[in-house]
Each structure stands twice: as C-alpha cells, then as structure tokens.
Amino acid sequence: IFIHLALANILVLLSKGIPETMEAWRLKNILDAVGCKILLYCSQVGRGLSISMTCLLSVFQANTISLSTSRWTTLKAKAPMCIAPSCLLFWILSLGLDVPSLLYMTGPENKTSTQSILNLIYCSSFNLPSGVTRGLSIVFILWDLIFVELMSSASGYMVCVLLRHHQLVQHLHGPRHSLIVMPEVSAAKRVITLVTLYVLLYGSNTIIMKVLHNTKIDSPLLLNIHIALSLFFPTMNTFLIINTNRR
C-alpha cells in the first residue's frame, strides 16, 4: 500500500508540480495539446489513486489494531490477501474514470476565450455537453464521498481503539509506563494524521474548485491556492510515509 501511495504522490507532483514550477519561473511553455492531455491525465489518475490508497491504508490499519474477537480474527487473516487485488482494482478504476480528461483538456488558450472554463496557463478545460458534465460530476463526487467516508470511519474506529488501549495500559502499568506504545499503535496514529490531513485539504480544495468552475471571474489568487493545496498533500504525505517506514 505504501508503494502504491508513494507512486500516486509522485504522479501528482511530477505531472502538476513541474508545469506549475515552470510557470512560476516564467519559463517557456513547451507543452502542446498532446503533452497537456498526458500530464492532466496522469495528475487525475494520481489524485484518484491517492484517495483510494489512503482509504485502503486506513481500513487495513483499523483491521490490524482491531479487537481480537472471532469476527475480527477472520478478517485479519484474509486482509493481507486482499491488498494486491484491491490495488489492481483501484488502478483500473482510476485509469478508466479519468479518460474524459483526455477529451476536454487542450493546450494553452487565450484567457479571453469564451469557451474556456478553466485556464491553467499550460492547459485549458473546455465546456462539455451538460449531460456529460452532470454524469461525470456525479461519478467523481460519489468516488470521493465513498472513500472519504470509509477513511473517516476507519480513523474514528482507530481513535476509539487507541483510547481504550491507553486506558488499559495506564490501568495495568501505572502512569510511569503509560507512554509505552505498541508498533501498530504508532502506525495507526500516523495513519490518522494522514487521513485528517487529507480530509481537511480535500474539503478546502473542493470548495475552491467549485468556486472556480461556477464563477466566471478570473481569479489568479484562488487558482494559485487551489494548486498549492493540491500539491501540499502529496508532499506532506511523502514525509509521513518516510516517518512511518524508514525503508
């Protein structure tokens, strides 16, 4: 899971971070329509993988530290065998759902163009038929809501388990040994931090993106904030992964 999550972050950072860095330094834009489509497609695939792999990580960690009852014991035994098929499924879904980005994105256009609804300096997004736009919006909203809800529920469950564990340790060993934490508990805390960071940034980024799409006002400030938030999570996520697994 860590490997796929790191790969998803690399896709986002390279496909979105490099063009934005070139623009910030006022370097010449070398992207044509094909290059723009490829970069935006990789960026969208990386974003979809990022949320799905973060969700998978939180659910797997919640299962790892769950109570050792007969019901959870069966799930714990089967969970490792489900990781590879789940990763493959998320790759297939992300690659398939983001195909429309190859259709409605093109190279840089004049900002005064009436057809362009989102100008990213190096790429522009054009209006699609209302039915297609509505259908794609529903699909992506459901995709995001399902994974955010799952990772939030898993994180909430882990918080309850950690609090119960802390109370048991404090009762058995006394305050002096209450700081002794099992490795899986330390990992769970980092996963909770990761999920909390994602949910906060996702909420802020989604609101800004809706404003950009639903208003006709050209706001470079909002666009820059949107770009910064979209790159902040992959960057911080990398450091959290390194801190969790030194390899």
Image (spheres, rainbow, N blue to C red):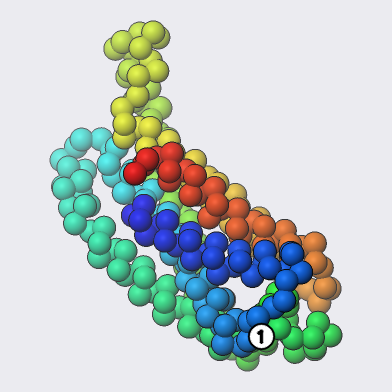
Q: Secondary structure at mark 1?
A: loop
Q: Is residue 107 above or below residue 75?
A: below
Left or right, 207 with respect to 146, comes to right
Please tell me which residue is depicted at 81% across the width and 82% down the height of the picture: 111
Q: Is residue 1 above or below residue 24?
A: above
Q: Is residue 243 above or below residue 127?
A: above
Q: Which residue corresponds to mark 1?
A: 107
- The one nearer the camera, 218 or 21, is 21
Q: Is residue 7 above or below residue 152?
A: below
Residue 154 in the image: x percent, y percent?
39, 46
Please tell me which residue is depicted at 47% across the width and 43% down the height of the picture: 240
Residue extending farthest to the front is: 27
- The one nearer the camera, 141 or 190, is 190
Left or right, 133 with respect to 60, comes to right
**Residue 207 in sight:** no
Left or right, 222 with respect to 84, comes to right
Q: Amino acid at mark 1?
A: Gly
Which image quadrant: the C terminus?
top left
- The one nearer the camera, 57 or 147, is 57
Figure disc tally: 1
Please tell me which residue is depicted at 63% across the width and 82% down the height of the picture: 31
Please tell me which residue is depicted at 76% across the width and 69% down the height of the picture: 26
Which image quadrant: the N terminus?
bottom left
Left or right, 192 with respect to 60, comes to right
Residue 43 in the image: x percent, y percent?
53, 70
